Image: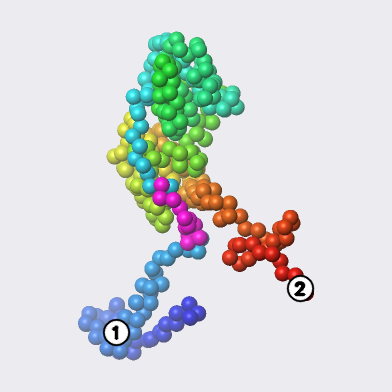
Amino acid sequence: MSGVVKVRTFCFTKEEQMRCCLNSPQLEPIIVPKHTMTQYVIIVMVALLLAIPGRSAAAEASLIPGLPEGFSNNSSIEPDYSLAVTAAELIDKVKQNRRITLVDVRSPEEFERLRIPGSINLPLHAVKKKVFLEAQPFALVSNGCEWRDLESECKRLQQSGLKPSILLGGLVAWQSQGGPLEGDRLLVATYKEIPAHLFFHEKDYETIKVFDVSPNPLFDAKKLIHGNVHAKNIESLVKLVMQYSSTYRTIVVFNENGEHYEKFDAALKKAGISTAFYLKGGINSYRIFLKNTTLSWKSRAERVVTLGGCGTCGRVASEEGQTERPRISE
């Protein structure tokens, strides 16, 4: 089949044209001949078949063979929010000069560009080694969406007799509540876009709610990002987020390629929600991350294909992926 559908066209008879004329003084019932009705049915059926949406070649290619079950299904981990302190609570403590140390666990480069006045910069793994932190409570400060590693370290620090907490929402929440900052404030906006690997690391928490803001639901979104909710437009997103929003709820938004997030963020801010996060690069970047991660789980034999003969032993790759000795003509 060539894929081209041929459709015959038919003209009304002069009598039928007269009956169909809108300017006719009399509105008589139109009597359609039997053979003409059959032609109408064929044309309508062909039109419906051509209108059925299908997956593009690019969409089909984006399916990830061998994707492990746990990569898409959330484990519904319940976070321990007894370790959390909100930005509003922490700002209030700072204003009242209450004894609390702010420990920024971001990289030294990021800390140099932007920081909370009076905070100190330490790698997360080095916090337990600082004796001066044993004397008073302290709060761990991150970009914003991180929680898993901070919670694990906080529990270890508690077992050592320390008094840690976690700034919920990190610098994104701190800025949204009007907390003071030194340096390049525009850096906070970049923290609202979370890379694929960080989303994958945090996605299993049951308090994370994910929204697909693509014009139409993406065909593989439900498989790759379990439990996401489609919002057909900005108004729909705001309404849905308002239903799910709470102090301890993390909102993550994505679309196909990560473009035009700013208009969704502006609408959410107008509705009073200023700590939403956005999947950097959209689901396209997440597909690539999952594909590469899935590949890394495979054995070397499954991942590596040798083209041509081996420079050491002279073996060549066969069609089945095995190697065999090169044949020597006699």
- Above or below residue 9? Residue 122 is above
Is residue 293 visible in the rendered image? The answer is yes
* Quadrant in which residue 136 is drawn: top left
Residue 40 inside the magenta-drawn segment: no
The quarter of the rendered structure image containing the C terminus is bottom right
Is residue 270 visible in the rendered image? The answer is no
The first of marks 1 and 2 along the sequence is 1
**Residue drawn at (35%, 47%), measured in percent from left and top?**
227
In front of the other: 60 or 315: 315
**Residue drawn at (45%, 79%), measured in percent from left and top?**
5
Q: Would you call the spot at circle 1 few (<14 residues within 10 Å), some (14-19), or many (20 or more)?
A: few
Q: Give coordinates of residue 73: x percent, y percent.
A: 38, 47
Mark 1 = which residue? 37
Q: CA distance from mark 1 to mark 2?
A: 73 Å
- Classify mark 1: helix, strand or loop: helix
* Quadrant in which residue 37 is drawn: bottom left
Q: Give coordinates of residue 287: x percent, y percent.
A: 49, 51
**Residue drawn at (47%, 36%), measured in percent from left and top?**
192
Say which amino acid is labelled 1. Met
Say which amino acid is labelled 2. Ser
Nearest to viewer (mark 1 / mark 2): 2
Mark 2 = which residue? 329
Give the magenta range. Answer: 59-70
User: Relative to residue 314, is residue 274 drawn left or right?
Assistant: left
